[in-house]
Image: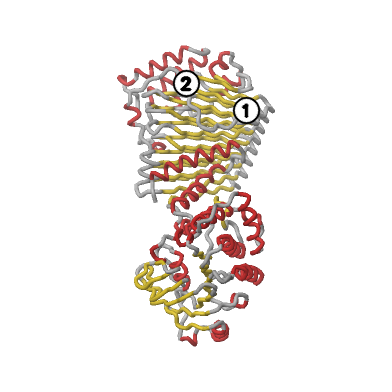
């Protein structure tokens, strides 16, 4: 489904990713782990199509198409979803308004009919239950005044509504207490399916206690330094990143 | 600057016919006002309040006072009381309210009931030459006068249309709500061609009265609109003002509210769109003259093309106005590299124990918000439209949900679509 080969990405002329290879097949869940500043979020944003990231070499194929030439909305309509590490607040735009516009765009792209208001509401109700979110949050402005946990849950709700083929979850576990973490993990697990692939980008192993990945990769200083099965995550938890010869820089580069 | 003798003719001609009519006290008032205008002339750029807005082109035009013209009602006007004007003359009155409550002001002044003659001209700044010209030249005028305790639930619409080329129209409204009265009034200004509208509205709210007042400016792209709105609020009254400047070549609004009685409360909100070569300038002044008064001011400006916006908002807290609570927010968006908005918040505080805050920003659409929406499948145009709509409609917060609110939102959305279409991302 997703084939990344020799991907080099620079931000403001500074190389961040220095030759990434990653293959994700339908039905698989991959975890990309690594210390702060290793380029994890950059990888997630490049896949989603954010501006400000310059691809200097390599390619990204998604369902055998060149992903990098697509606009962000085209990627979304083709089934890619990024759960943001820092979900954006948009005062004045109701959550439900975004969900409806987004779903109808994605459905149109899939060749399905748009849902009318009633069918849409029925559908959203089932998705709310899946992520354990209060209905009241649908009518609030997008993420405005939401707690950290509510924001992350809202990302998982959007994912549940849009039913992407490839979901990238960027640090979805960060800043969550244990209950919120479980709720988010339950939502993600409910969405696992043979047709859907997921990439969990995370610093810590604890999310992987609840979502068992098929493959674990360690990204450090812009390179994949190690790949393995779920046991690799446990080893990282025990030993940290030091044994891989990786130092943790202070902050992650952003465009 | 004094009006040169060779340029006086149109003002003298208009003044002669206007001053003929009405009771003697009004004739005197008009006569004096005309003298003041001819002496002071149009405001000049040297005047700090007119630093960003030039009336030089307007001053050079040869304008005349037109006769009556046709009305133009916008689509989907919600149900309510209606008064229409063409070129400053009443065309239609469609309301269950008597003439003495909603109707022509000149008629009402003939049987001059005391409160009207007492109020007219007392609020609008006598120091303003444009207000003086209006005082001298207004023709039929509009009056809204609700007796104590009267509550009119349906909105009232005064639709003012100008269709004559090179016309100058000076429209006057007086709104007096006696204690406890309540109303919603929309003054809509539209038109066709090149003209100058110079309207003045005075609002007086008695104790505990409530008014939602909307000025909706949808002038033609070649028109100039210089408006003044002055209000005085007695104890515990509430005034919500919304200024929507959605169309016109040059728009200038001078809005002054005086919270004169303790417990008075006001919102002064506005949204202006400046595209093409449009120029929109709001000067606002909120005076807290009494203790325990509250004001909230929210302005949202969007400029595209070579559009130019100005927001100059002054809040004055007078000596003795303890426990004043005033907040002002001016946020502005630029959609093109040639657009410009100047935002100037000002506070003057002469009392202790007050809460005042203001904030002003000028920036571009947030790229992070735009990307977030696009990453969910919305295209760039749709994402931008959602963000612009949310930004602009912030200013409508004081209009309660209902048919008026929905209609106003529609007017803003239509104007936004035109602006965004002309300023592609």
Question: Where is residue A237 shown, x and y percent of the image?
Answer: 57, 83
Crowding near the residue tagged with mark 1, few <14, some 14–19, many ≥20 C-alpha atoms within 10 Å: many
Contact, CB < 8 Å: mark 1 with mark 2?
no
Disc 2 element: loop
Q: Is B90 placed above or below B317 here? A: above
**Residue extending furthest toward the right:** B149
Q: Secondary structure at mark 1?
A: strand
Which is more toward the observer, A180 or B319?
A180
Question: Which of the marked residues, 1 or 2, is nearer the chain's N terminus?
Answer: 2
Q: Position of residue A245 (x, y in %)?
A: 45, 86
The residue tagged 2 is: B138
Residue B412 seen in the figure: yes
Look at 43% across and 52% down and name the residue there: B363
Horizontally, residue B20 falls left or right of residue A233, namely: left
Q: Which residue is mark 1?
A: B177
**Whole-Å distance between the Cαs marked 1 and 2?**
22 Å
């Amino acid at each position: 489904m997703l084939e990344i080969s020799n991907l080099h990405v620079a931000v403001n002329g500074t190389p961040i990713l220095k030759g990434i290879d990653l293959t994700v097949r339908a039905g698989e869940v991959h975890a990309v782990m690594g210390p702060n500043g290793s380029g994890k979020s950059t990888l997630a944003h490049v896949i989603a199509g954010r501006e400000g990231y310059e691809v200097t070499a390599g390619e990204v194929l998604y369902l055998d198409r060149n992903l990098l030439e697509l606009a962000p909305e085209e990627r979304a309509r083709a089934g890619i979803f990024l759960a943001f590490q820092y979900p954006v607040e948009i005062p004045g735009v109701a959550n439900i308004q975004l969900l409806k516009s987004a779903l109808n765009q994605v459905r149109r792209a899939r060749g399905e009919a748009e849902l009318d208001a009633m069918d849409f509401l029925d559908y959203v109700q089932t998705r709310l239950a899946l992520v354990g979110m209060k209905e009241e949050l649908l009518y609030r402005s997008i993420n405005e005044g939401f707690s950290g946990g509510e924001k992350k849950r809202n990302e998982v709700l959007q994912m549940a509504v849009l039913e992407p083929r490839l979901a990238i979850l960027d640090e979805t576990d960060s800043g969550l207490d244990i209950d919120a973490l479980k709720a988010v993990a339950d939502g993600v697990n409910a969405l696992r399916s043979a047709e859907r692939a997921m990439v969990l980008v995370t610093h810590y192993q604890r999310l992987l206690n609840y979502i068992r990945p098929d493959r674990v990769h360690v990204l450090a200083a812009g390179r994949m330094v190690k790949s393995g099965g779920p046991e690799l995550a446990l080893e990282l938890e025990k030993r940290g990143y030091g044994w891989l010869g990786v130092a943790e820089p202070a902050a992650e580069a952003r465009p | 600057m004094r009006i040169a003798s060779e340029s006086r003719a149109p003002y003298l001609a208009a003044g002669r016919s206007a001053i003929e009519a009405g009771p003697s006290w009004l004739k005197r008032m008009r006569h004096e006002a005309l003298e003041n205008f001819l002496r002071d002339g149009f405001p000049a750029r040297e005047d700090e309040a007119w630093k960003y807005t030039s009336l030089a082109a307007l001053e050079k035009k040869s304008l005349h006072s037109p006769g009556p013209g046709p009305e133009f009602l916008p689509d989907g006007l919600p149900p309510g009381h209606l008064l229409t004007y063409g070129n400053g003359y009443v065309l239609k009155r469609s309301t269950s309210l008597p003439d003495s409550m909603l109707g022509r002001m000149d008629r009402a002044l003939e049987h001059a009931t005391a409160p009207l003659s007492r109020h007219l001209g007392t609020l609008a700044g006598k120091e303003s030459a444009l207000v003086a010209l209006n005082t001298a030249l207004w023709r039929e005028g509009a009056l809204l006068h609700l007796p104590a305790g009267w509550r009119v639930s349906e909105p009232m619409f005064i639709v003012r249309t100008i269709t004559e080329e090179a016309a100058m129209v000076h429209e006057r409204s007086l709104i007096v709500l006696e204690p406890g009265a309540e109303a919603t009034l929309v003054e809509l200004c539209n038109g066709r061609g090149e003209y100058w509208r110079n309207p003045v509205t005075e609002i007086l709210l008695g104790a505990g009265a409530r008014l939602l007042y909307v000025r909706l400016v949808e002038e033609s792209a070649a028109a100039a609109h210089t408006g003044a709105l002055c209000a005085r609020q007695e104890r515990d009254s509430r005034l919500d003002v919304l200024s929507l400047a959605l169309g016109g070549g040059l728009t200038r609004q001078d809005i002054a509210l005086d919270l004169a009685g303790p417990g008075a409360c006001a919102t002064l909100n506005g949204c202006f769109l400046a595209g093409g070569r449009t120029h929109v300038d709001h000067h606002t002044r909120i005076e807290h003259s009494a203790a325990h008064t509250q004001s909230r001011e929210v302005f949202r400006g969007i400029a595209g093309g070579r559009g130019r916006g100005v927001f100059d908002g002054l809040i004055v807290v007078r000596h003795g106005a303890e426990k004043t609570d005033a907040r002002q927010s001016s946020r502005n968006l630029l959609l093109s590299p040639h657009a410009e908005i100047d935002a100037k918040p000002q506070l003057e505080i002469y009392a202790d124990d007050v809460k005042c805050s203001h904030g002003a920003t000028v920036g571009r659409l947030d790229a992070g918000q735009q990307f977030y929406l696009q990453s969910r499948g919305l295209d760039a145009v749709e994402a931008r439209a959602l963000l612009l709509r949310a930004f602009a409609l912030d200013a409508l917060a004081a209009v309660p949900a209902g048919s008026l609110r929905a209609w106003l939102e529609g007017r803003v959305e239509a104007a936004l679509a035109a602006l965004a279409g002309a300023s592609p991302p």
